[in-house]
Image (cartoon, rainbow, N blue to C red):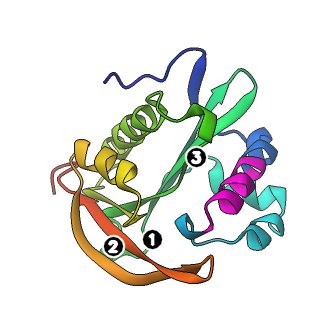
Amino acid sequence: MAAKPAPPCVLRTFAPSDAAAFQTLRLQALQAHPAAFFSSPEEQADMPLDAVAQGICPSPDSWAIGTWHNDQLVATMGLQRHQPLKLAHKAEIWGVYVAPTFRGQGIAHAMLARTLSHARSMQGLQQVQLGVLSSNHAAIALYLRHGFVRFGTEPRCVYAEGRYHDEDWMLLCALSPA
């Protein structure tokens, strides 16, 4: 599968002016799939737009991408380097979401390819990790196709929808030389 979403979708990093669109899609994701994210809709709704903008705009240690269909944000994915010096060789993928009507079009694949390409350009970054619900077989298959391996499962990681959900932890090593 090519690392390009179906036209007329466009992948791009976020600008501060995208904060409201990100907030809207993020709230949709949190409401539709409460177990898949650590944040709650209430916590996200209380976040000021300037804080949202700061969280999604590129910096030396973080990066986020959105997929746009015309003027509508339809998918998100972020990358955040760990801050302690002893952990700075690692980054985590966060906030992966594709709106339901845009699934199955290669958008997540394209965003992950672009995010991993950016990760490879980050000086000293050697590995990327992520957490995914153990029940999300489509996402796990995507990550496996991109070279991630499971390194553990956290039982009862998230409590949502009146029950506990397990999370698989996955890792992609050897992004750049040590």
Q: What residue is at 60 percent from the left and 78 percent from the top?
A: 160
Query: Where residue 123 appears, x then y in whole percent?
Result: 32, 50
Give the spatial CA distance, label 3 vs label 2. Answer: 20 Å
Query: Where residue 29 appears, x then y in whole percent?
Result: 66, 55
* For residue 46, side relative to residue 67 (left or right): right
Give the spatial CA distance, label 2 vs label 1. Answer: 7 Å
Q: Amino acid at mark 1?
A: Gln
Q: Amino acid at mark 3?
A: Pro
Q: What residue is at 61 percent from the left and 61 percent from the top?
A: 33
The answer to which of marks 3 and 1 sits earlier in the sequence is 3
Q: Which mark is residue 83?
A: 1
* For residue 3, side relative to residue 177 (left or right): right
Q: Main SS type for the magenta part?
A: helix
Magenta-highlighted residues = 23-34
| Pointer 3 with pointer 1, Cβ within 8 A | no
Helix, strand or loop for disc 3 = loop
Question: For mark 3, what is the residue?
Answer: 58
Q: Nearer the viewer, residue 61 or 7?
A: 7
Helix, strand or loop for disc 2 = helix
Q: Amino acid at mark 2?
A: Leu
Instruction: Confirm whether the magenta stretch covers residue 32.
Output: yes
Q: Quadrant of the N terminus?
A: top left
Q: Nearer the viewer, residue 160 or 53?
A: 160
Q: Residue furthest top?
A: 7
Give the spatial CA distance, label 3 vs label 1. Answer: 15 Å
Q: Which mark is residue 87?
A: 2
| Pointer 2 with pointer 1, Cβ within 8 A | yes
Q: What residue is at 30 percent from the left and 55 percent from the top?
A: 125
